[in-house]
Amino acid sequence: MTAPPRSQSPDWGNEEEVDALVSLGEALIIAILERAPMETIKNMVADGAPLWFQDEEGTSALHAAAYVENAKLMTYLIEEGAIWNSVDNLHNTAGDIALSFNNETCYNIVRDAGIRSDYVLATAELILSLLSSRSPPADSSLSLVLKATDTTAASSSETFLTSHLSFTKDEYGQEICLVKVSDNEEVGVMMGWERGIMQETVHKLCSGHENFVDGLKILNVGFGLGIIDTMFQSLPTPPSLHVIIEPHPDVLQRMRELGWFDKPGVKVLEGKWQDFIESDALLGAGGFDVVYTDTFSEDYKDLREFFGHVPDLLLGPESRFGFFNGLGATNATFYDVYTQVSELHLSDVGIDVEWSDVDVVEADGDRWGQTREYFTQRFYRLPVGRMRVSS
């Protein structure tokens, strides 16, 4: 059983109330799976059956409606407050269930609910708040289980920037950056499997650009392993200006060791992009031909804030913008929603996006299974944005 929205929170100290809600929730799920009439379902909801309830398998009323492929019922449940991105014990949303049946209509109902939410992390933040303030003791039989739905970012930018990073290679020889999360554990946060994505990104951002022959003016936010910056430097004509923003001290130290601070045309800004976004260090460049951002530990709120600055960073209509599209990529529905929402928000600031698919599984073979699971989709949706030209 997962936590309810705040307005529907039961008194966790009153086990009779909780038992009643559990019974109503279970009965609602069973009724949906047994294809009870719509009127019966509506009456059960009106009588207090909780739409946030999930049974021992993690199945919610919305999951059940997806199993029976009832699009009308799914629409009704979402309108009544069903949580579009709740996951079952296999980490599937109702949208994933619809996909398994190849039911595009039911899938789009869930996806569009996520898009309409505008800021897709709101539900997760609410649940975290509820768990900290409303949940029963950990040893209680009523203890809640928070199911992981998105492991694409660290807990916070501040935590990440004070963590220790180490750089090495895994058993397959791919580059990997590890972050220490405890005395006995390190996890990979940047990995060489992204190389194919970065190669295609550089091709899409740079090829055919009108300033390509003269050397592009490039801004990259987030050096990481240096994969994409090395590719920018390896263009037939190196960038005439290559600005790199990087905040992590361990990454900056590695950049010094590798000679990045001494490369011709390269300018390294030490700090967060927020520290420089309205400074002469960026605006004094007069605009960039290519802008790319890939920051670890920031969430969609931060990315959307960056979107708002992109028009001021681009040199003109031919300039191109890209970002690492990895948020929500541990779940097909979440990934689709993040992709659609980012397109809408970029459109709001006058940036039109073209998408192309990169098959990351086929490109990396067995190495894929060794990566940290912050991206589990077969296809990476690669974005390239351009300023909209007024007609």
Image (tube, helix red, strand yellow):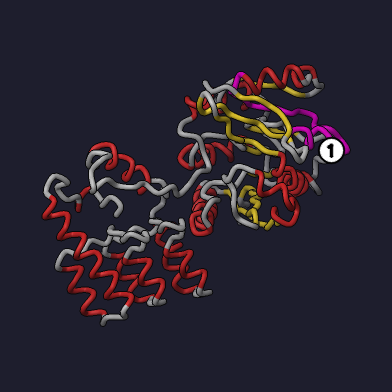
Position of 306 with respect to 82 (left or right) is right
Residue beneath label 1, please? 235
The C terminus sits in image quarter? bottom right
Q: Residue at x 41, y 46 (%)?
A: 121
When asked about the image quadrant of residue 136, the answer is top left
Taking the image as shown, residue 386 lies to the left or right of residue 11, namely right
The answer to whether residue 126 is visible is yes
Q: Amino acid at mark 1?
A: Leu
Looking at this view, is 148 or 89 the one in front? 89
Task: Report which quarter residue 214 is drawn in.
Answer: top right
Q: Which quarter of the figure has residue 173? A: top right
- Residue 20 sits above or below residue 258 on the image: below
**Residue most extreme to the right:** 236
Q: Position of residue 351 (x, y in %)?
A: 58, 49
18 left or right of 258 in image: left
Looking at the picture, does residue 123 appear above or below residue 268? below
Q: Position of residue 178 (x, y in %)?
A: 62, 30
Does 13 sit left or right of 205 as displayed? left
Q: Quadrant of the N terminus?
A: bottom left
Question: How many numbered discs?
Answer: 1
Foreground pick, 168 / 312: 168
Q: Report the residue at 64% width, 43% height from top.
A: 371
Q: Return the x and y of residue 134 as percentages of the image width and height.
A: 22, 41
Which span is picked out in magenta?
A: 229-249
Instruction: Please indicate, yes or no, whether residue 277 appears anywhere in the rendered image.
Output: no
Q: Secondary structure at mark 1?
A: loop
Label 1, residues with CA under 10 Å away: few <14, some 14-19, many ≥20: some
- Magenta residue check for 246: yes
Q: Residue at x 71, y 44 (%)?
A: 193
Question: Is residue 120 one of those drawn in magenta?
Answer: no
| Residue 23 spot, x, y in % from top left | 19, 64
Residue drawn at point x = 29 percent, y = 69 percent: 29
